[in-house]
Image (cartoon, rainbow, N blue to C red):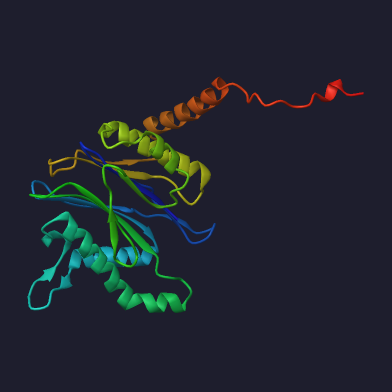
C-alpha cells in the first residue's frame, strides 16, 4: 500500500509520496514513488505511483524508453509530449501497453493488474495541470473546485485536506497540510511509511522550487507531528461536553 497526494493551487503545485512497499508483514522495503522529469525552462513533470510495484516500474521504463509511433522512426517518450494533457494520455498508453504484455499473466496468478498514477506539472507554453491516471489508462483532472487528488491509502489523510485546502491556499501552507495528511495516514496504517518525498513547483516557473526527502529524524516533521497531536488534544478539550441528559445512578435506591 502507499499514500500519495497532489495539490493544485493558484500559485503552483505540491506533490507528496511515501516510500514504503510491502508483500507481507515480514517483507517491507523502501522504493521511491515520486518520479521527476525536469528540463528547466522546457518542462517539469512529476509522477506519483501506487499499486503493483512491478507494473509501476514497467510503466516508468516505457515512459523513458518510449513507444513506437506508427509511420515514424523515433519513439514517442514523455519528453516529446507537447502538453500536460498529452502527457497524461501518454501515461495512459504506457499503462495499457504494460497491461497488454503482463496483465493477463498477473490475473492468472491472482495478482491482478493494479496501478495508478498522479501526473502533475507544466510544459512550456501550456498550463500547470494535475491528473489521476487509472489502471485502464483513462484519467481525471484536478480543478479549482477539487484542487487535490490522492492515490493509495487516502481515507485517513482526506479530512484535513477537505477542511483546509482551497485553490487560493498558499503553497507552503498547502505543503504543511499535505504533511499533516501524510502523518495522519502513517499513524493509522502501518503500510504507509517514511521516508517522504515531496516537490513544489511554482506556476510558470518551469523549474522545481523544492525537491526534498524527509528522513525519519527530520526535526521539522517531528515537530509538526507533535504540534498537530497536541493541537487535536487541546481542541477536543476546549469543546464542551455533550449536554444530553443521563440518569444519575447514585440517585437510585
- Of the 4 image quadrants, the one containing the N terminus is bottom left
Query: Horizontal and vertical percent for residue 20?
Result: 42, 52
Can residue 216 be seen from the camera position used here?
no
In which image quadrant can residue 115 be found? bottom left
Q: Is residue 105 left or right of residue 210?
A: right
Query: Horizontal and vertical percent for residue 203?
Result: 16, 40
In which image quadrant can residue 7 be found? top left
- Of the 4 image quadrants, the one containing the C terminus is top right
Query: Horizontal and vertical percent for residue 36?
Result: 23, 52
Q: Is residue 253 left or right of residue 223?
A: right
In which image quadrant can residue 116 be found? bottom left
Give the mark count: 0
**Residue at the image point whose x is 62% and y is 23% from the top:** 241
**Residue at the image point whose x is 11% and y is 50% from the top:** 126
Position of residue 189 relative to residue 85, above or below, is above
Q: In this view, does 90 lie to the left or right of 132?
A: left
State the residue in front, 84 or 167: 167
Can residue 17 be seen from the camera position used here?
yes
Query: Horizontal and vertical percent for residue 123?
Result: 13, 51
Position of residue 187 relative to residue 220, above or below, is below
State the residue in front, 10 or 90: 10
Position of residue 192 relative to residue 249, above or below, is below
**Residue at the image point whose x is 34% and y is 65% from the top:** 135
**Residue at the image point whose x is 83% and y is 25% from the top:** 249
Amino acid at each position: 500500500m502507499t499514500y500519495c497526494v497532489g495539490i493544485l493551487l493558484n500559485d503552483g503545485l505540491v506533490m507528496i509520496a511515501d516510500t514504503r512497499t510491502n508483500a507481507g508483514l515480514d517483507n517491507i522495503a523502501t522504493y521511491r514513488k515520486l518520479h521527476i522529469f525536469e528540463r528547466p525552462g522546457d518542462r517539469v513533470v512529476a509522477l506519483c505511483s501506487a499499486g503493483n510495484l512491478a507494473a509501476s516500474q514497467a510503466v516508468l521504463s516505457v515512459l523513458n524508453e518510449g513507444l513506437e509511433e506508427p509511420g515514424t522512426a523515433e519513439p514517442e517518450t514523455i519528453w516529446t509530449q507537447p502538453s500536460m494533457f498529452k502527457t497524461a494520455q501518454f501515461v495512459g498508453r504506457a499503462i495499457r501497453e504494460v497491461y497488454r504484455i503482463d496483465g493477463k499473466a498477473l490475473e492468472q496468478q491472482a495478482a491482478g493488474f493494479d496501478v495508478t498514477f498522479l501526473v502533475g506539472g507544466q510544459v512550456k507554453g501550456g498550463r500547470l495541470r494535475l491528473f489521476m491516471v487509472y489502471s485502464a489508462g483513462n484519467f481525471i483532472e484536478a480543478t479549482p473546485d477539487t484542487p487535490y487528488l490522492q492515490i493509495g491509502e487516502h481515507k485517513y489523510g482526506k479530512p484535513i485536506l477537505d477542511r483546509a485546502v482551497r485553490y487560493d491556499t498558499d503553497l507552503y501552507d498547502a505543503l504543511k497540510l499535505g504533511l499533516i495528511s501524510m502523518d495522519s495516514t502513517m499513524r493509522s496504517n502501518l503500510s504507509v511509511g517514511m521516508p517522504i518525498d515531496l516537490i513544489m513547483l511554482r506556476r510558470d516557473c518551469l523549474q522545481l522550487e523544492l525537491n526534498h526527502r524527509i528522513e525519519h529524524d527530520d526535526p521539522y516533521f517531528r515537530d509538526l507531528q507533535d504540534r498537530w497531536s497536541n493541537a487535536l488534544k487541546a481542541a477536543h478539550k476546549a469543546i464542551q461536553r455533550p449536554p444530553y441528559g443521563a440518569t444519575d445512578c447514585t440517585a437510585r435506591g
